[in-house]
Image (tube, helix red, strand yellow):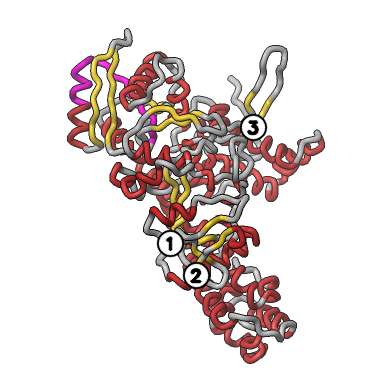
């Protein structure tokens, strides 16, 4: 019988906390339910805690909090094979998002630090590997054969296909595996390893060299010299644009070598037209070399200037901090709702004033005890804006609740801690914004980009970070719009024409810049608002009208960057001879 298991589905469980039970080897599932947990407990030295999801995200969060109080871990590590836990929810290949969504929502409410780890991006076949990698942070571990030894016996019988493929890839297996239920073909690749495989071919396609080189500067320089000795003109192709390939790309560009990028998805599809079903690093390298030989539409890689590189680092860090702040605010709301729901409803916890209040007073009793006048004075001494208004809101909420809730004292301490964490994160984001602005102003296109309505300091910096600052790399405004996901793509066949759909492959970061800047422009620019109203009058939905406006803005921004001039309401008149 499929589905999650509750404690009532087992006999022989051991109670860990008030609502959490462990599954020992002696436990048995009650028919018709089945479970592999007792056998796992018998063969592995770990404790398996049964998390019951039937009470939703709040119930899972409550169980996690009990385990955190019992075990006092330094962090809660959430490990997902494949990365489908990062899905938006509307992907056509997504199969089972409920469990992941519940887990994420619950982890956003716990008080301990949470780390989300993804092993084997795209390995479960639910999300493309490139889409998963685009939102991941730094690499923390590379699986090796020794990592699979403690669980090798379990993998012989355990039904998890994704975990089995991850272990196979760690042991060095390469090729294409088929997911049993979905019939999807999943490639086991070498992305993220410590070595590169290089294949050199001549114009006729004859192989001249095939060698494995470590991602180490002396070996890469030796490989470069050997390849250059084979011919006068060399063109390089690579299936990674950063990360583990950053050193190799930088060495090639520093030596004046032309480098072209071809995505891993394109390589996988191209492999189907070559002889044989096997997949190895050597075969992938040979396919890349042959594709570079015959194709003329590949994306060239350029050395980015220091300003753009710094903006990539700074904006990436800012994204992480904003996500941390959002998670912490959500946890703060959840804790405050548990003891003082009226105050949680009345306060905007994204502002400094309410956060300052919560660092000192978190319960109705404490707020009533200090009184309106003294609370106002306390807030004013801490430079809170409009302290009289905030004190009045807090007193009114406190007067409406005279019931003391269970765990109020401990929860108040957690609210105090979380409020301080949010304030620290706010300070870090503000300091980072100043650093981004200072670095962005050093770029030659600063005045041009920020002259566009809706494109301020942060969005403008993210635009440079996403595009690299090289408009020549895209060729036309249409290609830039396609790269940013604001241009529809045709899906015609036979007699069917004019069938447009949303693109599936685009830069999510750049699309966010285009979309949010279009919204800001519609809100603050009369010309943009008129364009939006015209599209709505034509029968387009809100999202369609915003995307149409974003697409039009790409043309304008492209022309401004091409001509090196700032945005003006009236375009300059052409001079006549």
Task: Classify mark 2: helix, strand or loop.
Answer: loop
Q: Which mark is residue 16?
A: 2
Q: Which mark is residue 492?
A: none
Relative to 94, residue 5 above or below: below
Judged left or right of residue 566, residue 371 is right
Residue 443 vs residue 10, the one in the foreground: 10
Disc 1 to disc 3, C-alpha distance: 46 Å
Task: Classify mark 1: helix, strand or loop.
Answer: loop
Which residue has dot 1 on it? 47
Magenta stretch encompasses residue 232: yes
Relative to 526, residue 206 above or below: above
State yes or no: discs 1 and 3 in contact (Cβ < 8 Å). Answer: no
Disc 2 to disc 3, C-alpha distance: 49 Å
Residue depicted at x 44% and y 57%: 77
Q: Give the range drawn in magenta.
A: 224-241
Where the C terminus falls, by quadrant?
A: top right
Residue depicted at x 43% and y 42%: 157
State yes or no: discs 2 and 1 in contact (Cβ < 8 Å). Answer: yes
The x, y position of residue 282, in whole percent, is 31, 24
Judged left or right of residue 248, residue 68 is right
Magenta stretch encompasses residue 337: no
Q: Residue 502 carries which label?
A: 3
């Amino acid at each position: 019988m499929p589905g999650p298991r509750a404690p009532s589905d087992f006999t022989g469980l051991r109670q860990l906390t008030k609502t959490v039970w462990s599954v020992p080897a002696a436990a048995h599932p009650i028919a018709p339910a089945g479970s592999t947990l007792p056998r796992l407990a018998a063969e592995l030295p770990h404790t398996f805690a049964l998390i019951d999801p039937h009470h939703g995200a709040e119930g899972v969060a409550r169980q996690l909090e009990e385990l955190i109080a019992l075990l006092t871990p330094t962090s809660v590590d959430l490990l997902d094979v494949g990365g489908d836990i990062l899905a938006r929810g509307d992907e056509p290949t997504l199969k089972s998002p409920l469990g992941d969504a519940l887990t994420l929502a619950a982890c956003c409410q716990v008080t301990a630090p949470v780390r989300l780890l993804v092993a084997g991006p795209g390995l479960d076949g639910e999300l493309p590997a490139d889409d998963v990698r685009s939102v991941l942070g730094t690499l923390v571990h590379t699986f090796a054969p020794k990592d699979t030894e403690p669980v090798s016996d379990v993998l012989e019988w355990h039904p998890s296909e994704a975990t089995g493929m991850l272990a196979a890839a760690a042991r060095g297996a390469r090729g294409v595996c088929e997911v049993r239920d979905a019939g999807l073909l999943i490639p086991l690749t070498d992305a993220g390893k410590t070595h590169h495989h290089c294949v050199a071919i001549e114009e006729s396609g004859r192989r001249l060299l095939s060698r494995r080189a470590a991602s180490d500067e002396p070996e890469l320089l030796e490989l470069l010299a050997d390849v250059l000795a084979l011919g006068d003109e060399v063109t390089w192709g690579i299936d990674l644009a950063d990360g583990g390939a950053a050193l190799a790309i930088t060495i090639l560009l520093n030596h004046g070598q032309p480098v072209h990028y071809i995505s891993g998805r394109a390589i996988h599809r191209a492999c189907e037209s070559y002889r044989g079903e096997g997949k190895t690093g050597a075969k992938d390298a040979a396919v890349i070399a042959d594709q570079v030989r015959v194709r003329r539409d590949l994306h060239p890689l350029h050395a980015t200037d220091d300003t753009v590189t710094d903006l990539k680092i700074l904006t990436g860090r800012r994204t992480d901090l904003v996500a941390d702040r959002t998670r912490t605010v959500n946890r703060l709301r959840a804790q405050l709702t548990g003891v003082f729901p009226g105050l949680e409803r009345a306060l905007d916890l994204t502002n400094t004033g309410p956060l300052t209040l919560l660092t000192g007073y978190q319960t109705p009793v404490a707020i009533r005890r200090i009184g309106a006048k003294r609370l106002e004075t306390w807030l004013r001494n801490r430079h809170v804006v409009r302290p009289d208004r905030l004190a009045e809101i807090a007193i009114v909420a406190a007067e409406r609740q005279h019931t003391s809730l269970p765990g109020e004292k401990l929860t108040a301490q957690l609210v105090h801690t979380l409020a301080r964490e949010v304030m620290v994160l706010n300070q870090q984001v503000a300091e980072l914004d100043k650093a981004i602005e200072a670095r962005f102003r050093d770029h030659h296109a600063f005045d041009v980009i920020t002259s566009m309505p809706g494109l301020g300091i942060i969005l403008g910096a993210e635009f440079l970070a996403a595009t690299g600052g090289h408009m020549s790399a895209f060729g036309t405004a249409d290609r830039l719009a396609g790269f940013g996901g604001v241009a529809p793509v045709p899906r015609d066949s036979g007699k069917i024409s004019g069938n447009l759909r949303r693109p599936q492959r685009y830069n999510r970061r750049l699309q966010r810049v285009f979309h949010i800047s279009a919204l800001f422009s519609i809100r603050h620019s009369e010309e943009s608002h008129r364009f939006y109203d015209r599209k709505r009058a034509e029968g387009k939905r809100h999202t369609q009208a915003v995307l149409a406006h974003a697409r039009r803005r790409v043309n304008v921004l492209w022309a401004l960057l091409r001509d090196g001039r700032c945005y003006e309401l009236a375009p300059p008149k052409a001079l006549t001879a």
